[in-house]
């Protein structure tokens, strides 16, 4: 199945010169969604993953599904101020600004094997901040998975964690 054919390009969103990759057509097709979730989980089936930590907001679309595929728990990584409990936080740079993400302080256990998930790997700033959150809690980043990788931004070069990195669609 050609997953890329279910992704729509939206020019100049959220700002001029950015091409937004709209995944709502993919999400609305049950067969394409199931196939995508299976492809994202597949490389990590035998990796001993104990938790999938997904980044808000579009990472949430896939995080619980992939956790179910892998038979493990799910942890949300949210934008600043969205979680109701005590949090750890990390600041990071985007290709078009800066932001902060947070995770509950008690979300992960020491030594727990975590698969980090986000919808897009662009510059690597968001996933690197998420990796720092995981490591703050003594857990291990055991893999990273993305629906889309924007190869021209070379975000992989900015990932400092030594783990498998898997992307489904490349632009």
Image (cartoon, rainbow, N blue to C red):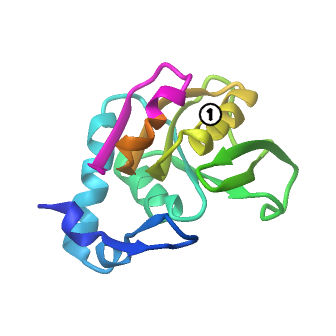
Q: Quadrant of residue 14?
A: bottom right
User: Which residues make up the magenta segment?
Assistant: 156-171
Expressed as whole percent of the image width and height from the top left, the position of residue 136 reads 75, 29
Q: Quadrant of residue 82?
A: bottom right
What is the secondary structure assignment of the residue under circle 1? helix
Residue of label 1: 131
Which residue, as the protein is rendered here, is positioned at the far front?
17
| Front in this rendered view, residue 33 or 73 | 33
Please state the horizontal and vertical placement of residue 28, each as a whole percent of the image: 32, 80
101 versus 33 height, above or below? above
Q: Nearer the viewer, residue 3 or 76?
A: 3
**85 sits to left or right of 36:** right
Q: Residue furthest left?
A: 1
64 versus 106 height, above or below: below
**Residue depicted at x 88% and y 50%:** 86
Q: Is residue 158 magenta?
A: yes
- In the rendered image, residue 1, in percent from the top left (x then y), is placed at 11, 61
Q: Is residue 101 left or right of residue 141?
A: right
Rate crowding at label 1 as few (under 14), some (14 to 19) or many (20 or more) other CA atoms within 10 Å. many
User: Total marks drawn?
Assistant: 1
Q: Residue at x 69, y 55 (%)?
A: 97
Q: Does residue 119 show up magenta in the picture?
A: no
Query: Is residue 126 placed above or below 56 in the rendered structure?
Result: above
Q: Position of residue 121 (x, y in %)?
A: 46, 46
Residue at image point 14% right, 61% down: 2
Locate residue 18 relative to residue 146 in the image: left or right. right
Residue that sits furthest to the right in the current view: 86
Q: Nearer the viewer, residue 90 or 109?
A: 90
């Amino acid at each position: 199945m050609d997953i890329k054919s279910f992704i729509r390009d939206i020019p100049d969103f959220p700002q001029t010169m950015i091409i937004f990759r709209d995944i709502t057509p993919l999400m609305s097709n049950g067969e394409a969604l199931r196939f995508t979730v299976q492809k994202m989980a597949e490389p990590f089936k035998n990796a001993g993953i104990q938790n999938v930590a997904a980044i808000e907001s579009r990472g949430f679309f896939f995080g619980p599904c992939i956790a179910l595929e892998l038979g493990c728990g799910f942890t949300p990584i949210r934008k600043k101020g969205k979680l109701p409990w005590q949090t750890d936080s990390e600041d990071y740079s985007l290709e078009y600004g800066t932001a902060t993400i947070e995770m509950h302080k008690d979300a992960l256990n020491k030594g727990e094997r975590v698969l980090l998930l986000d919808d897009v790997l662009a510059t690597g700033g968001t996933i690197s901040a998420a990796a720092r959150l995981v490591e703050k809690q003594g857990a291990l980043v055991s893999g990273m998975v993305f629906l889309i990788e924007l190869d021209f931004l070379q975000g992989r070069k900015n990932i400092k964690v030594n783990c498998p990195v898997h992307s489904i669609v490349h632009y």
